[in-house]
Image (cartoon, rainbow, N blue to C red):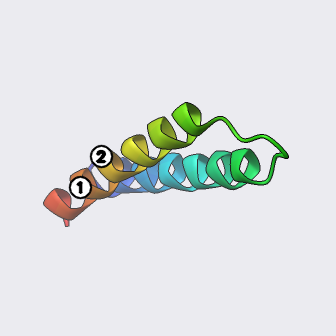
Amino acid sequence: MEASHVSALQLKHAGLERKLAEEQGRPMPDLVTIQDLKKRKLRIKEELAHIV
Protein backbone atom coordinates (compact mmCIF):
# COMPACT_ATOMS: atom_id res chain seq x y z
CA MET A 1 0.00 0.00 0.00
CA GLU A 2 2.76 2.44 0.90
CA ALA A 3 4.45 2.04 -2.50
CA SER A 4 1.20 2.68 -4.36
CA HIS A 5 0.51 5.73 -2.21
CA VAL A 6 3.99 7.10 -2.98
CA SER A 7 3.45 6.45 -6.69
CA ALA A 8 0.11 8.24 -6.61
CA LEU A 9 1.65 11.24 -4.86
CA GLN A 10 4.50 11.34 -7.37
CA LEU A 11 2.01 11.32 -10.23
CA LYS A 12 0.03 14.15 -8.64
CA HIS A 13 3.25 16.12 -8.13
CA ALA A 14 4.24 15.62 -11.78
CA GLY A 15 0.77 16.70 -12.94
CA LEU A 16 0.96 19.86 -10.86
CA GLU A 17 4.43 20.55 -12.29
CA ARG A 18 3.03 20.31 -15.83
CA LYS A 19 0.12 22.62 -14.96
CA LEU A 20 2.53 25.07 -13.36
CA ALA A 21 4.80 25.12 -16.42
CA GLU A 22 1.77 25.57 -18.67
CA GLU A 23 0.45 28.49 -16.61
CA GLN A 24 3.86 30.17 -16.43
CA GLY A 25 4.21 29.84 -20.20
CA ARG A 26 1.05 31.80 -20.90
CA PRO A 27 1.37 35.42 -22.07
CA MET A 28 -0.55 36.65 -18.99
CA PRO A 29 -0.13 34.01 -16.29
CA ASP A 30 -2.56 34.00 -13.37
CA LEU A 31 -0.40 34.61 -10.31
CA VAL A 32 -3.07 33.28 -7.93
CA THR A 33 -3.21 30.01 -9.87
CA ILE A 34 0.59 29.77 -9.86
CA GLN A 35 0.69 30.35 -6.11
CA ASP A 36 -1.99 27.71 -5.53
CA LEU A 37 -0.19 25.14 -7.68
CA LYS A 38 3.08 25.77 -5.85
CA LYS A 39 1.40 25.34 -2.46
CA ARG A 40 -0.23 22.08 -3.57
CA LYS A 41 3.11 20.80 -4.87
CA LEU A 42 4.79 21.68 -1.57
CA ARG A 43 2.13 19.83 0.44
CA ILE A 44 2.66 16.72 -1.67
CA LYS A 45 6.43 17.03 -1.35
CA GLU A 46 6.13 17.31 2.44
CA GLU A 47 3.83 14.29 2.58
CA LEU A 48 6.31 12.29 0.52
CA ALA A 49 9.12 13.30 2.86
CA HIS A 50 7.15 11.98 5.84
CA ILE A 51 6.45 8.66 4.14
CA VAL A 52 9.95 7.92 2.89
Say which of 28 and 13 sits in front. Answer: 28
How far apart marks 1 and 2 lie (CA) works out to 5 Å
What residue do we see at 23% from left, 55% from top?
46
| Badge 1: residue crowd in 10 Å (few <14, some 14–19, many ≥20) | few
Give above or below for 52 relative to 46: below
- Within 10 Å of disc 2 (Cα), the crowding (few <14, some 14-19, many 20+) is few
Question: Residue 9 at what x, y percent from top left?
Answer: 41, 49
Q: Position of residue 50 (x, y in %)?
A: 14, 58
Report the residue at 78% width, 40% height from top.
Answer: 28
Please indicate whether residue 42 sits to the left or right of residue 51 in the image.
right
Q: Which residue is mark 2?
A: 43
Which mark is on residue 1? none
Cβ–Cβ below 8 Å for labels 1 and 2? yes
Horizontal placement of 26 versus 31: left or right?
A: right
Amino acid at pointer 1: Glu
Which residue in the rendered view is the most extreme toward the front? Answer: 28
Residue that carries the numbered disc 1 in the rendered image: 46
- When asked about the image quadrant of residue 40, the answer is top left
- What kind of residue is marked 2? Arg
- Is 34 or 40 nearer to us in this picture? 34
Q: Quadrant of the C terminus?
A: bottom left
* Secondary structure beneath label 2: helix
Comparing 42 with 25, the one in front is 25
